[in-house]
Image (cartoon, grey):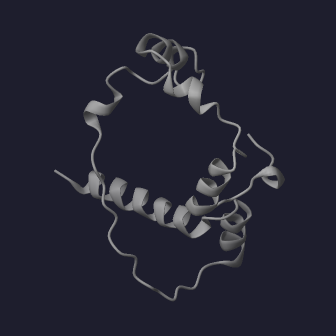
């Protein structure tokens, strides 16, 4: 995992400007000229891809998130500190944890 101190965030506009100036490190010409066989070989050799089944996309479901509702909520300080220590996006992660709990509770309640 990357050191959090090395992580940089850019907007889409900033990234496009960097690409236009030739400041990115991606060899776009090599990628654009890859054959299907070369692409398949690159995917097959990617260690992050090794446990992904070939038909992973068949059960994919489009999820359009609903607008968030602003809420004032009192939580234990240590709980908030723990989520904040995980870095930016901690409120989104808290939402995901609550959603997973809700889904599990609904599943256990189903006949």
In the figure, 29 relative to 107: above or below?
above
User: Quadrant of the rendered structure where residue 25 is?
Assistant: top right
Q: Position of residue 23 (x, y in %)?
A: 73, 46
Residue displayed at 48% across by 66% down: 95
Between 79 and 70, the residue placed more toward the observer is 70
Residue displayed at 50% across by 27% down: 32
Q: Position of residue 68 (x, y in %)?
A: 40, 76
Q: How many marks?
A: 0
Do we see residue 70 in this rendering? yes
Residue displayed at 28% across by 58% down: 106
Q: Position of residue 10 (x, y in %)?
A: 66, 60
In the figure, 29 relative to 86: above or below?
above
In the figure, 43 relative to 24: above or below?
above
Residue displayed at 58% across by 62% down: 13
Do we see residue 48 in this rendering? no
Between 15 and 86, the residue placed more toward the observer is 15
- The extreme left residue here reads 111
- The extreme front residue here reads 21
Q: Is residue 39 left or right of residue 84?
A: left
Q: Position of residue 7 (x, y in %)?
A: 75, 52
Between 96 and 21, the residue placed more toward the observer is 21
Between 98 and 1, the residue placed more toward the observer is 1
User: Quadrant of the rendered structure where residue 100 is?
Assistant: bottom left
Quadrant (top left, top right, bottom left, bottom right) of the N terminus: top right
């Amino acid at each position: 995992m990357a050191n959090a101190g090395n992580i940089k965030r850019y907007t889409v506009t900033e990234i496009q400007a960097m690409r236009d100036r030739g400041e990115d490190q991606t060899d776009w010409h090599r990628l654009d000229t890859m054959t299907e066989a070369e692409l398949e070989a690159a995917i097959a050799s990617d260690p992050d891809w090794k446990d992904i089944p070939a038909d992973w996309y068949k059960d994919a479901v489009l999820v359009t998130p609903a607008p968030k509702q602003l809420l004032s909520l009192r939580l234990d300080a240590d709980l908030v500190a723990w989520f904040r220590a995980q870095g930016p996006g901690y409120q989104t992660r808290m939402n995901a944890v609550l959603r997973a709990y809700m889904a599990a509770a609904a599943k256990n309640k189903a006949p």
